[in-house]
Image: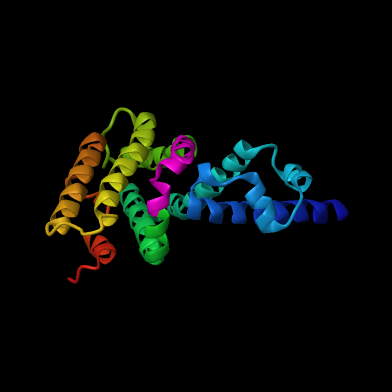
Amino acid sequence: MPRVVKEEDFAARRKEILDVARQLVYTKGYEQVSIQEILDTLKISKGAFYHYFNSKQDLLDGLIDGMIDAAEQILRPIVDDPALSAIEKLRRYFDAGGRWKVAQKAFMLDLLRIWRSDTNALMRQKQEAAAMKRIAPVLTKIIRQGIAEGVFSTKYPDQFGSMLVGLSRGFEDSVADLLLAEHPPPDALEQLDAAIGAYSDSMERILGAPAGSLPLADIEILKEWLSIES
C-alpha cells in the first residue's frame, strides 16, 4: 500500500508541474519558457524538478503525451463502439473535436495564436510526429472496418491512417488562417465552406467512400467561430 501511495503522489506532483508548464507555454510559447520560470511559479527547487523530469526536452515529451492523451480520450470510445459503422465513427470523431473546441472558443483562439507562433515551432513538430505514431493506428482501425463493411475501397489502409492525420492538420491550418485574421474577409464563410469541401472530397476519394459521406467539419460550427449568424 505505501508504494501505491508513493506512486500516486509522484504522478500527482508530475501532473502539477506539467499543468504549470502547459499554462506558461500557452501564454508565452515553449521556446520562451525556462525551467527556472517553472520553478519560481511552483516554488520548488531545481532538484525537485529533476526528480520528475530529466530535462526540458523530457518536459516537452510529457506535454505532448498529455495532448495526445486528450485526443485519444475523444477518439477511443467512438472507435470501440461496436454499434457504429466506420462512416459514423469518422463523422463522430470530426464532430466531437469541433464541438469540444467551440465550447471553449475564447481560450482556443488564444491558444491557437501562440500555438502557431515561431516560439512553439518545436512543440508543433513534436506533436505532429506523436499524432502520427499514436492516432494514425486508431484511425487505421476504422478504415479497416470500413473496408470490411464495403464502404471504403482503399488498398492502403495502413498508410491512409497517417494521411488522414496529415489531411486533418492541413485543414486545421487553412481554417486557422481565417479564424485568426484581425478582420475576416467578407467571403470568409465561403472560403471555409470551400475548404471543407476540398479536404472532405480528397478524403472520400482516397478512401473510396461515397461522395458527401465524410464532411471534415460542420459549417454551422465554423460559423460560431466567426460569430456569423445563420
Q: Residue at x 27, y 54 (%)?
A: 217
Query: Looking at the picture, how far across and down is residue 60, in whole percent?
Result: 57, 41
Query: Looking at the picture, how far across and down is residue 131, in whole percent?
Result: 45, 40
Q: Is residue 181 left or right of residue 12?
A: left
Q: Is residue 32 left or right of residue 216?
A: right
- Residue 90 against residue 56 in the figure, above or below: below
Query: Looking at the picture, how far across and down is residue 225, in whole percent?
Result: 28, 63
Residue 120 shown in magenta: yes
Answer whether residue 209 is visible to the viewer in this image.
no
Answer whether residue 133 is visible to the viewer in this image.
yes
Query: Looking at the picture, how far across and down is residue 15, in whole percent?
Result: 66, 54
Please report the bounds of the magenta region as a residue range: 112-130
Q: Is residue 110 left or right of residue 48?
A: left
Q: Quadrant of the C terminus?
A: bottom left
- Residue 179 against residue 48 in the figure, above or below: below
Of 190 and 99, which appears nearest the observer? Answer: 190
Q: Quadrant of the N terminus?
A: bottom right
Q: Residue at x 30, y 45 (%)?
A: 173
Of 73 and 209, which appears nearest the observer? Answer: 73
Q: Quadrant of residue 52?
A: top right
